[in-house]
Amino acid sequence: MLTVNDATLYQILIISIMGVSNIRDDIKKFLEEMDDLTKKGIFGDKPKMHALLKEKIDLNSYFIQIFLDWLKDKRQIGKDNVHKTISLLLQLYFNAIKNNSEKSIEILGYFIDGFPDVNESEIVKHLYTWYESLNTWRNSLPTGKNPGDDYQVAQNSITVYQNGIELVGKILPVITCLRKVSLNQDFDAKNIYQRYLGPKIEEFEESFNDNTEYLFITNLIDKKLRNAVSHLDVRYDRIRKKYICIFSTRNKRETNHIPAKDFLTKYFPNPGYVIQGYIFSLILIVALAQSRIADFGKIATSLK
């Protein structure tokens, strides 16, 4: 489950890319507003410290410090999942850049600029939506002063999971495109990006059919629960303390009851693992940009 410190990676990465020259005005305005709120401590002391730190040191040192702070944080459950995702992505970046550096850098830039012929960077905006819902869920949790409402907490957790799944659906095409670059395969980036999530996952898994280690990423997303979430067929039963999920099969609709504890420990955190791994892999590739390509490969391998 994400901790307050882990959630700051959203703030820090987004704030840090404000200096990109070709970033769109609407996105830049949004980032400036987030930067101002972060410096005021709206998102907590740790994000505030990081936001102020970036004005004192160079970008590479800043990113490295963010990553080191995350490594030291012992509060997150499932951190090994994030670690493995980072390792897999860095190795993919290495292979793609080694094969075609110009095309690879262009694809990595889709995070900021959006995919070809897409009006805006949906990845950045979905990242904000996911983080905002995560923050709402966290604020609804019981505290000493607030006993909380289990129904509201559960409903907020469904929103976080749904937004996380949507964001993963925006990230997967970037990974798929980089895989195709590493294999010298032709592809239509816009076509890959604009598919529904199911076909995106199929394309992703097909592109890694000879390297199934990468299926770890998509295996984190439960197929039946994803199906239910995509059709808005997930709700919480406060009497039975279970999440009710209705999903479609080829011939019928089925209902699955997931105990609250199982949902929050086995399913809820998983999109966040992929998102964190992706964001941290971008932080590291920026921080390592001045390294020789051979050194980059060694670093990626050492993370396994």
Image (cartoon, helix red, strand yellow):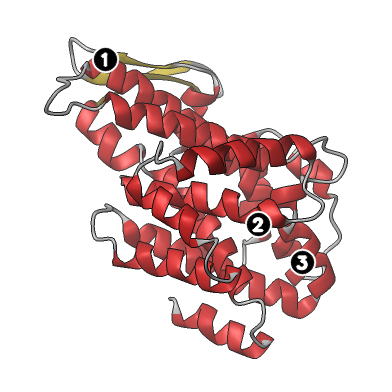
Q: Nearer the viewer, mark 1 or mark 2?
A: 1
Write down the residue under mark 3. Answer: 104
Q: Residues within 10 Å of mark 1 (few under 14, many from 20)?
A: some
Specify whether 153 is left or right of 254: left
Number of numbered markers: 3
Mark closer to the chain start, 3 or 1: 3
Which label sits on residue 151?
Answer: 1
Q: Secondary structure at mark 1?
A: helix
Residue 170 x/y as whole percent:
64, 42
On screen, 243 above or below 200? above
Please, what is the three-letter code of the amino acid marked with disc 1?
Tyr
Quarter of the image where the N terminus is located: top left
The structure residue drawn at horizontal position 50% and vertical position 47%, both measured from the top left corner, is: 11
Q: Are marks 1 and 2 in contact (CB under 8 Å)?
A: no
The structure residue drawn at horizontal position 51% and vertical position 28%, both measured from the top left corner, is: 227
Q: Residues within 10 Å of mark 3 (few under 14, many from 20)?
A: many
**Residue 229 visible to the viewer:** yes
Q: Quadrant of residue 151?
A: top left
Label 1 – label 2 distance at C-alpha: 36 Å
Please, what is the three-letter code of the amino acid marked with disc 3?
Ser
The structure residue drawn at horizontal position 79% and vertical position 42%, both measured from the top left corner, is: 24
Q: 88 or 61: nearer the eye?
A: 61
Quarter of the image where the C terminus is located: bottom left
Mark closer to the chain start, 2 or 3: 3
Please, what is the three-letter code of the amino acid marked with disc 2?
Ile
Write down the residue under mark 2. Answer: 175
Mark closer to the chain start, 1 or 2: 1
Q: Secondary structure at mark 2?
A: helix
Q: Are marks 3 and 1 in contact (CB under 8 Å)?
A: no
Label 3 – label 1 distance at C-alpha: 45 Å
Residue 247 x/y as whole percent:
46, 21
Q: Quadrant of residue 145?
A: top left
